Image (spheres, rainbow, N blue to C red):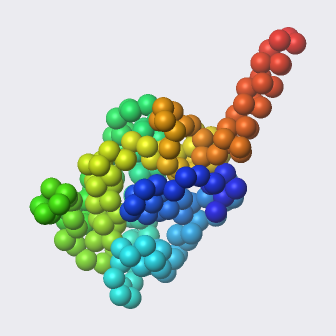
Amino acid sequence: MSVTGASTPAPGRLETVRRFVNTLDIDAGTDALATPGDLAGWLRSASLLPGDAPAAPDDLAHAVAVREALREALAANHGGDPIPSGAVAVLNAAAARARLTATLTARDGWRPRPSAGGVDGAIGGLLALVGDAMADRTWSRLKVCVNDTCRWAFYDASRARSGKWCSMQVCGNRAKQRAWRDRRAESTT
């Protein structure tokens, strides 16, 4: 985990989405999804992939594309902006591959659920968690750090829903120091 990744966990299963996005630690330069085996292991540990179903190289490329599309969607949550069209296209293609369908539940109303198996179904399960979070209104609080060298997913638990950084002590402090240095440099010129 990145030093910048110290943040409040997301509620319920939305934490799985946060952890998935954070499989790439930009700050540390590490990727927990480096191989198809890593992907299968991660999906199993998140209870998204049953048994010992394998992952192929194209599954890994697909999962990484979905992860980065989710990261872009989380960036849009800062201002309530629309999800960028490229990210929407990737996520819709993933939903189609997973054969997401709406299922009526006795408690929660209509919820998206994948009918595909394997990695496609597991990715669909992840997208279903996004749909559930949108329905229960927790999705808009899941964001990525605005620090371009971080982009760590975090849950904005602030009352005003105005969190920008994964950690005020690390990324927030860096941004404030940079702004102070910029103001100081401007005043001396």
State whether residue 48 is above or below residue 189: below
Front residue of this view, candidates 73 and 64: 73
Quadrant for the C terminus in the image:
top right
What residue do we see at 15% from left, 63% from top?
105
> Which quadrant of the view contains residue 98?
bottom left
- Residue 127 seen in render: no
Between 135 and 68, the one lying in front of the other is 135
| Image quarter of residue 117 | bottom left
Q: In this view, does 92 lie above or below 16?
A: above
Q: x%, y% of residue 100?
A: 20, 62
Among all residues in the image, which is located at the extreme bottom? 52
- The answer to whether residue 73 is above or below residue 57 is above
- Is residue 87 left or right of 135 when viewed as pictured? right
The N terminus lies in quadrant: bottom right
Residue 153 on image: x %, y %:
52, 51
Q: Which residue does the image show at 59% across and 52% down from the upper left?
A: 7
Q: In this view, does 165 lie to the left or right of 130?
A: right
Q: Residue at x 50, y 43 (%)?
A: 156
The answer to whether residue 92 is seen in the rendering is yes
- For image coordinates 34% across by 35% down, the residue present is 82
Horizontal side of 56 relative to 155 (left or right) equals left
Residue 90 in picture, x, y percent from top left:
33, 53
Point out residue 67 in the picture as x, y percentages from the top left corner: 44, 58
Count the marks: 0
